[in-house]
Amino acid sequence: MSYGNQQDSNNDPQSAPRQRRAGAGGILGGLLGGAGRSIKMRLFIGLAVALFGVVSYYSSAEKNPVTGEVQRIAMSAEQEMALGLQAAPELLQEMGGGLDPKRDPRAKLVTAIGEKLAYHTEAAKSPYAQKRNFHFFLINDTKTINAFALPGGQIFITRALFDKLQNEAQLAGVLGHEVGHVIHRHGAQQMAKQKFGQALVSAVGVGAGEQSAVQIAQMVNQFKQLSYGRDDELESDDYGMRLMIEVGYDPSEMIGVMEILKAATGGAGRQQEWAQTHPAPESRIEAIKVFLKKNADVIRTKSLVKDSSGGLMK
Ligand SMILES: [Zn+2]
């Protein structure tokens, strides 16, 4: 997907009010979201699709080509990529549109650091990187603090979160975490668990050319219903910090990211909504400290920085 394809949503001043925050949990809560508030219609669609998905779940166990772990995944890497690519434009539009990296230096930085993490680290061995399928988007939403990933490599961060970050290392931490979700195939795994992955692949007829707007909308809603578990979040934190070290950023800045999330989720209602499926920032900070201790030797021998291109974050 190129930014050229998103010109309409990028430049459409009407697109922002159309965003639907209510559904911004689940996979959209890559960093801090929770279970999306279900709308009945979505449930019906979900149930219908789920019926078709049951069969395939039990017949699919696959070895992750990058991490080596055996996972139940209802779809191939190619199908993950196709689904993500098809869903991304509508998601972008619903969330306020993507900022063009050719015109916006902040979006350019998101792309540059994201691509460094995806293509110049161990993540480059993944089928998603080999197909150059990682794309990093800065969403023009200054109110919702969030970052998330779709299966196959489409990764998003909102302006609201970007603006709170203090340096490039923190941005790398956020994006690296999302790359972790993609590489570990958490989205596809959740879809398999929730038994709608394969049905989704059939429903939108991946590889069969143009899809109807209704089918795409259904798929986007399915993605919104997904949520990751605590283990997936901690695994992605860990993976993201490894990528940070690989490209030269100080992984201890990930603690700063958690502090930002903690401050952002201080309100009791918000807290309750996502706390069930996502570890509290405090427990993630504890895990981050364990990582830093465990990798202290490697960290000490490298000259790791908070910023490399100077001044762009502030
Ligand atoms: Zn996450």
Image (cartoon, helix red, strand yellow):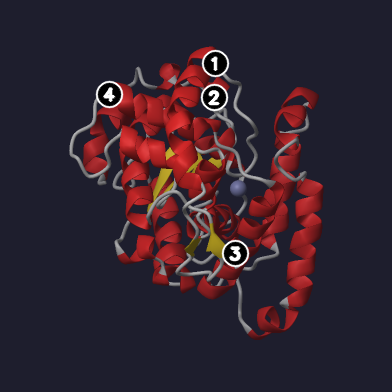
* Mark 3 surroundings: few (<14), some (14-19) or many (≥20) residues within 10 A: many
The residue to which callout 3 is attached is: 239
Q: Which mark is residue 23?
A: 2
Give the alpha-carbon distance from disc 2 to disc 3, as whole Å. Answer: 27 Å
Q: For residue 209, which quarter of the picture?
A: top left
Q: Earlier in the sequence, mark 1 or mark 3?
A: 1
Mark 1 and mark 2 in contact? Answer it, CB < 8 Å: yes
Label 1 sits on what residue type? Answer: Ile
Q: Is residue 286 left or right of residue 218?
A: right
Mark 2 and mark 3 residues within 8 Å of each other at the beta carbon: no
235 vs 189, left or right, is right
Q: Are marks 4 and 2 in contact (CB under 8 Å)?
A: no
Amino acid tagged 4? Ala
Left or right of 204, for residue 141: right
Tag nearer the camera, 1 or 2? 1
Decide which of tag 2 and tag 3 comes sooner along the chain.
2
Give SS at disc 3.
Answer: helix
Mark 1 sits on what residue? 39
